[in-house]
Amino acid sequence: MDEFLVSKHQKYFQLCLNSLPAKAQSEDSNKLAIVYFCIQGLDLLGKLQLTFQEKKIYADFLFKHMIIDPNDEIQSFRASQTFKLPSSQNNYDLPNLAATLFALSSLLALESDFSQNLNRHKLMRFVSKLQILNGPEKGGFKPVLDQKGGQVVGESDLRHCYTALCVRKMLKYDELPLEERLHDIDVKLAERYILDRVNFNGGLSSNRYTESHSGLTFCGLGALKLLNYDFNSNETWVANTIRWLVNRQVDYPQTIEAYRDEEYEYWDEDDIGGFNGRENKFGDTCYSWWVTASLKLLGDQYFECINFGAAEKYLLSKSQSRLMGGFGKDSQSFPDPLHSYLGIAALTLWKGRSGLEYTGENNLTGIDELLVISQTSSDFLKQMEWK
């Protein structure tokens, strides 16, 4: 029987929350991302065992990452306290879209009612400032706001579009009457931006006419779902998307074995059952989530096209670290918080579907595939009431 190493994964996340392994310390500048992966990961394992006081301490730590706007017009978060510099050096202390989402997601897991501490109109003013309203990238979002000049900074792609819409959802801005949305985004432009990145094969890409990518496909589909897009309204591209996603699960026909002695460059037996992000690429733990969650967003009937038994065997026997817990990107890689969280998220999403029995499965608690947070976090969000 395969084994899901619950106690080791728990210890791994707790380690990363307190002191990053040497190989991961360069990621301290993304502190809120690491906190999100670890806290939400523990929640998926049913091991976020904190007292009320401990939850408050963690929540206070997250709120310390809020950026104080001298004009009191926006609210936002920084990615790490590393960037909290004196005001004369605040060119580096910039309002960050992803950090804002990670902060909100982590606060939900801590059952911290941020509706009591934050102003959603000021948060949405920040988000709306990041939307591009002119030019070839019109409708998309950039990730960072320059406080001095008020200019948006960085590249535009579907990751930031999805992130912006997740923040909007967590603030329940989409539930407000139109006349009360003081600083909403242009949802029609956002939808057009996403649809312009659907490729001929159904996958979605960073820019028009560039290669389809599984992670960006999830971000695009998730963003459309957050905009209440009807996937049945265009059966042609959606059918192509389903086909392309299903073909991201790695397997090799018997005939390919003839090439093994000739060192066929795309052959790796360890990848069987896993998923890749693009054609002719090797398997990677994170795509187990991006691909199957994308299918789940499109409908349960498409989600069932996956070989769940092979997928679980890949994660449990190939990319799970049996030595220290966590998951690496593949069988040869050191575990890291991102792949650890997404590996566990995938197993949670697939729970009970394969018929494959493995120890530790019953610990998995449930996940909201649209917002990529635990079901307990999602339930807490639903009961929050903004004044």
Image: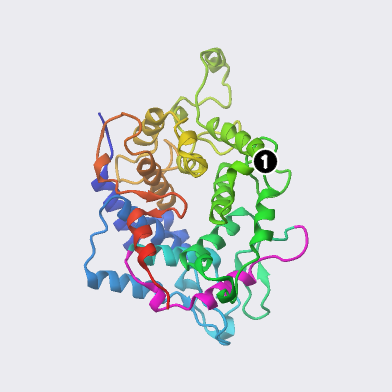
Which residue is pictured at 42% across the width and 35% down the height?
331
Which image quarter: residue 137?
bottom right
The correct choice, above or below, for 37 with respect to 97 in the image is above
How many tags in the picture?
1
- Amino acid carrying mark 1 in the image: Glu
The correct choice, above or below, for 169 with respect to 374 in the image is below
Q: Is residue 337 magenta?
A: no
Q: Is residue 130 magenta?
A: yes
Residues 299 and 74: in front is 299
Horizontally, is 77 left or right of 241 in the view? left
Which residue is pictured at 44% across the width and 51% down the height?
338
**Spot occupied by residue 135 in the image (x, y as percentages of width and height):** 78, 62
Residues 222 and 68: in front is 222
Quarter of the image where the C terminus is located: bottom left
Which image quarter: residue 209?
top right
Horizontally, is 192 left or right of 271 in the view? right
**Spot occupied by residue 157 in the image (x, y as percentages of width and height):** 64, 55
Q: Residue furthest bottom?
A: 71
Under circle 1, the secondary element is loop
Which residue is pictured at 33% across the width and 48% down the height?
366
The correct choice, above or below, for 106 with respect to 213 in the image is below
**Spot occupied by residue 57 in the image (x, y as percentages of width and height):** 29, 73
Can residue 131 be seen here? yes
Q: Which residue is mark 1?
A: 211
Can residue 335 be seen here? no
Quarter of the image where the N terminus is located: top left
Which image quarter: residue 243?
top right
**Spot occupied by residue 95 in the image (x, y as percentages of width and height):** 56, 73
Q: Which residues are magenta?
A: 110-136
Label 1 crowd bin: few (<14), some (14–19), many (20+), radius 10 Å: some
